[in-house]
Amino acid sequence: MIELKSRKHAADDLGSAIELCYAKGWTDGLPVVPPTAERIEAMLEAGGLKPEQQLAFIENRQVSVTAEKVAINAVMAGCKPEYMPVITATIDALADPKYGYHGPATSTGGSAVFMLVNGPIAKKIGMNSADNVFGQGWRANATIGRAIRLVMQNVIGTTPGVLDRSSLGHPGKYTFCIAENEEDSPWPAFHTTRGFKPEQSAVTIFAALGVHQYSNGLSATPEGVLTTACAQMRMSAGTNRQPQYALVFAGEHQLIMQKAGWSREDVQKYAFEHSQMSHAEMQRANIRPGPVTPESEKTMQPLVHTPQDFLVIAAGGKAGVQSCYIPGWGGKNGSQSVTQEIKVP
């Protein structure tokens, strides 16, 4: 029998329990699953965790995130117990100094935690990596991302209008969790670029703004597809700060890359070289201070610090000529993507 430490609340029925969660401010605006002791214990057992076990310590907030609190919020989000290893790995990644939790979680910039899952666990728990990959319809994608947001709100205290001061926010703040389409990808799985083996499972987190979709059905070359992406990225949010960017290629654009034999590094190099802007162009767009000068006309600024700051991902449906890019929050000095191994007990 697992001994839980959290305070217990009584409710007459399911409806009353749901309304209690609303009254206590524990929801994200949508109804939650009442976290009964039985459900919490199932989560902990699936993760091989003790209730008091610390999964992360958020330095800026001086908050210890325990397994029990994470399990409670995973239940409320609607997760199955087998999702718990993905959730705990993500919580661990959130506390990594490279990610820099406090900035992206609290700023007016309004980022969300984008999660990319790689490895065998994605298929095992039924994650979506194909059609409607950023949309509704898959329990694992929807509830894992939601669980992370509830932990941020209910455990760490990142509450909208209080600590979370996002001016606009975006729908990814409900959930922003996908798997990579490793089977159809023209490249090795993303987590292998971070030192993991294909047979390992891992989650990558990224402080992300919203999804920017673009279409290109006129080009049959990687250069053509990327020219479209670069033209749109040049004027995207945060240009002057050089954050990381996720480049997500769906089916038909994946095939173009594959037929041309383009590696992930080829994509990164081309995007780096062709997404640069002159300081003058940035000044005219009011995203860089100072007057336009002959020197600023000639001075170019890359969108990101290095080609590797483009996170090249394969995901989305096979049909259609759509892909997308996702700008990162702030600048690379404020937050960087982090990849954490998912360990299944």
Image: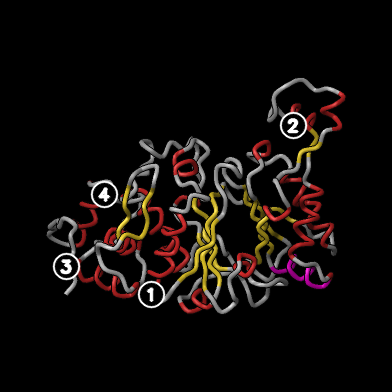
Whether 254 is among the magenta residues is yes
Q: Secondary structure at mark 1?
A: helix
- Which is more foreground, mark 1 or mark 3? 3
> CA–CA distance between discs 3 and 4?
26 Å
- Residue 218 vertical position relative to residue 272 in the rendered view, above or below: below
User: Decide: marks 1, 4 in contact (CB < 8 A)?
Assistant: no
Q: Secondary structure at mark 2?
A: helix
> CA–CA distance between discs 1 and 4?
26 Å
Residue 316 in view in this figure: no
What residue did someone put label 4 on?
A: 22
What residue did someone put label 1 on?
A: 82
Going from N to C along the chain, the mark reached first, 3 or 2, is 3
- Please, what is the three-letter code of the amino acid marked with disc 1? Glu
Q: Could you tell me which quadrant the C terminus lies in? A: bottom left
Q: Along the horizontal axis of the image, is 160 left or right of 24?
A: right
Residue 18 in view in this figure: yes
Q: Could you tell me which quadrant the N terminus lies in? A: bottom left
User: Decide: marks 3, 2 in contact (CB < 8 A)?
Assistant: no
> CA–CA distance between discs 2 and 4?
45 Å
Crowding near the residue tagged with mark 3, few <14, some 14–19, many ≥20 C-alpha atoms within 10 Å: few
- Please, what is the three-letter code of the amino acid marked with disc 2? Met
Per the rendered image, the range of residues in magenta is: 251-259
> CA–CA distance between discs 1 and 2?
48 Å
Q: Is 325 in front, or is 240?
A: 240
Going from N to C along the chain, the mark reached first, 1 or 3, is 3
